Amino acid sequence: MSRYLLVVPPLTGHINPLVGVAAELTARGHEVEWCGYPDRVLAATGPGAVVHPCTLPATSELVRPPTLTGPAAFRFLWEDFFIPLAEAMAPAVTDAVRAFRPDAVVTDQHAVAGALVCERLGVPYFTSASTSAELVDPLAELPKVAAWLTDRLAALRAAIGDPDATGDPRFSPYGVLAFTSGDLLGDAADLPWERIHLVGPAIADRPGDPDFPWAALDPARELVLVSLGTANTDAGARFLGEAATALGLLGDRVQGVVADPGGQLTNPPPGVLVRPWVPQFELLGRARAVVSHGGHNTVCESLWHGLPLVLAPIRDDQPIVARQVAEAGAGVRVRFGKVTAPKLAEALRTVLDDTGGHRTAAEAVGRSLRAAGGRQAAADHLEQLVRAHPVASASR
């Protein structure tokens, strides 16, 4: 059996796709350990995971001004978060590789320390692409920003990687696990398909919420889940208020559930259930539609269930994911900073009534996501990696 080290940043949306992969590898008899931030990893995996802890940089929390969007938000994300994160993680990744001696590493696309350390130590690695946005070159129309990032990654490689190596550390030369499908990705003819494996969502069991008030849900009404993920509490207050009001306007037919980790909704309409944390996957199994910011995990899990979406992207990869959903016909897009409760209620009626065929399209995309193979397909590719590229003992 083989050993796999999973390298992840302190971001729930980047950890969750690999939880199912880890469970599948373990079920096949392989050894799996993690390198990252123990509280974040253990919250996603449960208490049994072995985590090699990383030192947090000063910018350990991804907090940005609510109005920061577009290229400025992208540069902030790398300059103030991902680059310092890589510098802080590199010693721990190096120690983890030397202590655990993995046959292969799986490193998140934005935990670039994993890639750079692996190329320096000669360990084969796969990239985990937790979002499809990077696959379609989000900087194609921003050449100056692209050049800036290339320079920053080159400097980072000189500091912690192999200075003689080439290529983008966000895309392993050994292969990329992309947790999406061709039906959602759309036209991406220029991708190096020999290295990119579309595996769909890697669905895994998650810790439940024994305190969730299931009995409070009205089975006679259509369940709608509203979630902006875990990294957008700084920007979500106005939108969540409008969303809650929209759910109230549809209260005769809709049972609204709102995830509000920041505690920003203090006076929701009657019948709208607001919780700081929700058992999302279980709720999706009962839902009829989802309102989201366009986070890749929530989008793919919703479509996996065949649910149409109303998407209000904020920044980062979210506009690209929202565009992919709209182009697939599986949802509608609204403006995060401008939409009002009546307009949001109208968008919800559109997807619930299926006047534009959104549910049919969502179900079709869902079939493609399930057919991609998920955690089993990802584990197959990782086993093939180890067989094709055995690690010499001297390099571990």
Image: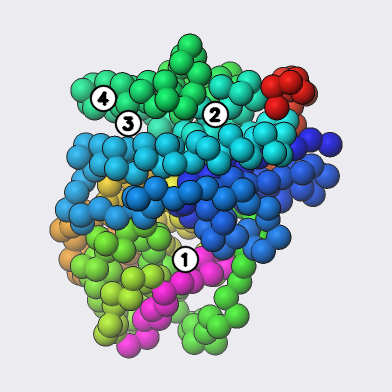
Q: CA distance from mark 4 to mark 3?
A: 14 Å
Q: Number of labelled discs?
A: 4
Identity of the amino acid at label 1?
Answer: Arg
Marks 4, 1: nearer the viewer: 4
User: Badge 1 is on which residue?
Assistant: 288
- Binning the other alpha carbons within 10 Å of mark 2 as few (below 14), some (14 to 19) or many (20 upward) gives many
Compared to residue 281, the image places residue 108 above or below, namely above
Image x and y of residue 309, in percent? 39, 56
User: Badge 2 is on which residue?
Assistant: 117
334 or 53, nearer to the observer: 53
Q: Is residue 375 visible?
A: yes
Residue at image point 57% right, 68% down: 282
61 or 297, nearer to the observer: 61
Identity of the amino acid at label 3?
Answer: Pro
SS at mark 2 in the image: helix
Residues tagged 2 and 3 counted as in contact (Cβ below 8 A):
no
Identity of the amino acid at label 2?
Answer: Val
Marked residue nearer the N-terminal end (2 or 1): 2
Quadrant occupied by the N terminus:
top right
> Left or right of 252: which side holds 385?
right
Image x and y of residue 147, in percent? 27, 21
Marked residue nearer the N-terminal end (4 or 3): 3
SS at mark 1 in the image: loop
